[in-house]
Image: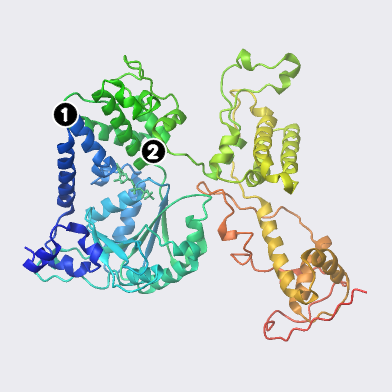
Amino acid sequence: MDPPWVQSSFEGIGGDLSKASGCRNTISSLRPHIPVASKVKSRRGAAAASCASMAKTGWRQDYNRDSAESWVERHAPTTTMELAVHKKKVEEVETWLRAHALQYNARKGSILLITGPAGAGKTATLQVLCKQLGIIIHEWINPLEIGGNGFGKETFGWEREPRGFGSGVQTQVALFREFLLRANRYRALCLNGGEASVEPEARLILLEDIPNQFYREPSSLHDVLRKFSICGRCPLVLVASDCSGSEYSLRTLLPRGIQEDLGVHVISFNPVSPTSLLKVLMRVASAETAQVRGRPCVLNQTVLQDLCASSAGDIRGAINALQFAWQCASIRTQDTSDSTSSVFPRKLLRGGVGFGPGRRGRRGTESPTSPEESRTVFGGRDVSLFLFHALGKILHCKRENGPISESHALPTHLTHQQRNMLAVNPEDVVERSQMSPELFTLYLHQNYLGFLHDAEDVSAAAQHLSDADCLTADWAVRVEMRDYVAAVATRGLLHSHVGRARSGVAGVGFRPLHKPEWISVHRKYVEARLEAKQLFSSFCLPPLALHLELLPYLALLNTPLRNPGQIAFLQDVGRFMHIKLPHRQEVITIAEHDGGGIDPDNNPTDPTSALPAPSNQSAYRDLSASQPQPMDSHEGYEDEELFIEEFDSD
Ligand SMILES: Nc1ncnc2c1ncn2[C@@H]1O[C@H](COP(=O)(O)OP(=O)(O)OP(=O)(O)O)[C@@H](O)[C@H]1O
């Protein structure tokens, strides 16, 4: 029992009380342990009661109950067997947890990063495993107001309790640092005896809700994590969704170099497979059917399959869509009159919700025939493509099988241009890759050679890619022409692929894909531009004059420059004619889950990031005698007084 003063002060506020007051430690130690299940039940009970008072019939009551509670929560997995995640991934997470959270001697500040698409079950897996292994989760939740309290929630299995930190004006980052470094420092007070010994020792910190400030300034997150990896007292698990192409992507926040520095272990989840998704939806649907009193409302299997297809491996989205479809069906069954049509558009009620076993039931209801249709009906997910798959869809040039229908047949004089129908819509692929058409074209340009069979095909493809390049050459119309760039490059490439023009022709099989060399060349260009600006700032020339007039001129002169940086730079950019490239530059292979944007690890617009060491030293070799020779090594360059000879252009 709570002491009377605690009861009287906090009666009726329930679990959220400590969140509001920011002194959760004391409260949780004084209050008896309330299992979360009971909290949830009581909440459900209240919701159901309020619904019941409004309900006129049993059906209406069920509908209100349904709408009051999310099925995602109601049917959350409780055991690893119920998880719709691939077994290997679950095992990987479990192995890491056993090694780092359960082992007493394990390095305490170790970090696990779980990535994957949204709704792939990353958090659910962690929660289920922690519950199973008896690990308490301290989760960081961003404070709603800066200057108020920062909160963490502590979970054990499904239990959630807020944790507050002292009041006063503090920045979000400071609060976060305090949370991360102190979350496991002290154990909760236990004044009623006994409970502390029952509580398991193993803990971890869960960070899913990353403070916004870190997206603006990732280095501050790196600093905090560095400190944590040294003096953290329990493991940290970061859960982050892949959002390729977004500036808020994980790769911006935690580039590969930093991950290696901190020894971050990465486990990457895939989207939930359609088979697992279907199993979960069927389980949820049959559990709901069993609960509905009176006449059951059943969604047929085809509808469930459509929902799986449209949710693209997002289990949360699929269950939400199922709930929505179910409620539409319930309303339709309850209200035989047309009155509901005004509330729910006919389109929603017509598609997707079948009754009984057949796809097209006796009632004439038609379920969607394609994922796209079901997406429009139930608001499914807008599916983006990983770069690897998007490129593959164009380069492998898949076409439909079977003979060409008469309506699509070309006249006899154009039969050499006849191709089977494409299996994909190329513009749609470019759009879903979340890249600009220009960048996508660069990737095609880099990789198309390995996929074409004949020199004629290569020639035709090169012609189309060049046409696409020309379309954006004029800056005044560049934006308007972008869509045409995508169409000309992709359709031109697909059309040039005569080897795959007919159905039944075998593809080239797996081919590794590479990043465009343009990216490294552009990076070098940006680097050189900045370097020249710094080294030759005293000439006060605009970039165009500096690069096209002064630097080529200086490179030809035997001017005794005293600044070794200037000399090295001139040798590097001025020896263009002397560079021999016996083979192609080393190209970077694209991994399956790489995003489409320019890799921030090697961002060409930021030459300071992860650039290869300047090759100026190696540039000294093979210099002609006419080139200025270095007078000094680079060592001591910063201490040396700079002296740049005046350059008289007359
Ligand atoms: N069989 C199941 N397996 C996994 N999750 C399930 C299952 N059934 C229901 N769910 C629910 O699906 C939801 C999956 O969301 P979860 O937060 O785990 O995904 P996530 O990959 O972490 O996505 P995000 O990065 O967007 O948070 C959870 O609410 C979970 O309770």
| Residue in the foreground of this view, choosing between 319 and 15 | 15
Task: State the residue in front, 213 or 94.
Answer: 213
Residue 277 in percent (x, y) is at 34, 36
x%, y% of residue 362?
31, 14
Q: Secondary structure at mark 2?
A: loop
The N terminus lies in quadrant:
bottom left
Q: Which mark is residue 273?
A: 2
Tell me the CA gap for discs 1 and 2.
Answer: 39 Å
The amino acid type of the residue labelled 2 equals Ser
Residue at the location (68% across, 86% down)? 639
Say which mark, if any, is on residue 57.
1
> Left or right: 162 with respect to 403?
left
Question: Residue 269 location, x and y as percent?
Answer: 40, 48
Can you say whether 387 is above or below 337 in the image?
A: below
* Residue 397: quadrant of the picture: top right
Give 187 or 23, whichever is nearer the viewer.
23
Residue 541 placement (x, y as % from top left): 80, 70
- Residue 406: in sight, yes or no? yes
Q: Residue at x 50, y 63 (%)?
A: 216
Q: Quadrant of residue 276?
A: top left
Q: Secondary structure at mark 1?
A: loop
